[in-house]
Image (tube, helix red, strand yellow):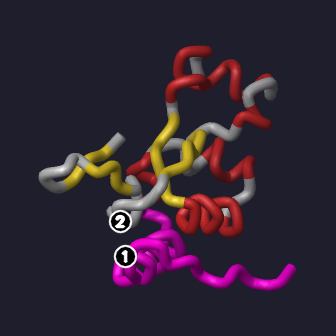
Amino acid sequence: MTTDGPADTPVCALCGRPERLTRHHLIPRARHRNRRTRRQFSLAELQTRVIPVCRPCHNHIHRTLTEKDLERDYNTLEALRAHPEIQRFTRWIAARPVGFKPKSPQR
């Protein structure tokens, strides 16, 4: 996990806020049994490509991108950070205080 500051508090890999973190699988677990996925990635990669993210960032990732898109195009931290909608959200949430929970859109 990423750390920042003297207390080595874990921070979100996307927004950098010191929050309680969740594990985001860069290659979605639902896609692990897919033939194309198994050809493209080793079993070790499937199990270890995980990043620590706060709940708001995690929710936004899954609201913005499909599992297929995540597997195919956004399976690295750098690729996720480069996505314009993810960038916009992480800049916005980074300016909010620790513990802030954005309202999620109605479905």
First in sequence: mark 1 vs mark 2: 2
Residue 41, given in percent of the width and then of the height, sits at 59, 23
Residue occupying image coordinates x 72% and y 34%: 29
Q: Which residue carries the number 2 mark?
A: 17
In the visual, does 7 lie left or right of 59?
Answer: left
> For this rendering, which residue is in front, 55 or 64?
55
Identify the mark at residue 94; answer none if there is no mark.
1
- Secondary structure beneath dot 1 equals helix
Amino acid type of disc 2? Arg
Q: Is residue 10 left or right of residue 37?
A: left
Q: Quadrant of the C terminus?
A: bottom right
Mark seen at residue 46: none
Label pair 1/2, CB-CB below 8 angstroms: yes
Q: Quadrant of the N terminus?
A: top left
Q: Nearer the viewer, residue 22 or 64?
A: 22
Q: Is residue 49 above or below residue 2?
A: above
Was residue 99 drawn as part of the magenta stretch in this picture?
Answer: yes
Q: Residue at x 39, y 51 (%)?
A: 78
Picture residue at 43% right of the left edge, 48% below the top: 77
Q: Quadrant of residue 91?
A: bottom left
Which residues are drawn in magenta? 81-107
Q: Nearer the viewer, residue 59 or 45?
A: 59
- Above or below — where is 48 with respect to 59? above
Residue 57 lies in the magenta-colored region: no
Q: Amino acid at mark 1?
A: Ala
For label 2, the SS is loop
Q: Position of residue 42 (x, y in %)?
A: 58, 16
Measure the C-alpha gap from mark 1 to mark 2: 6 Å
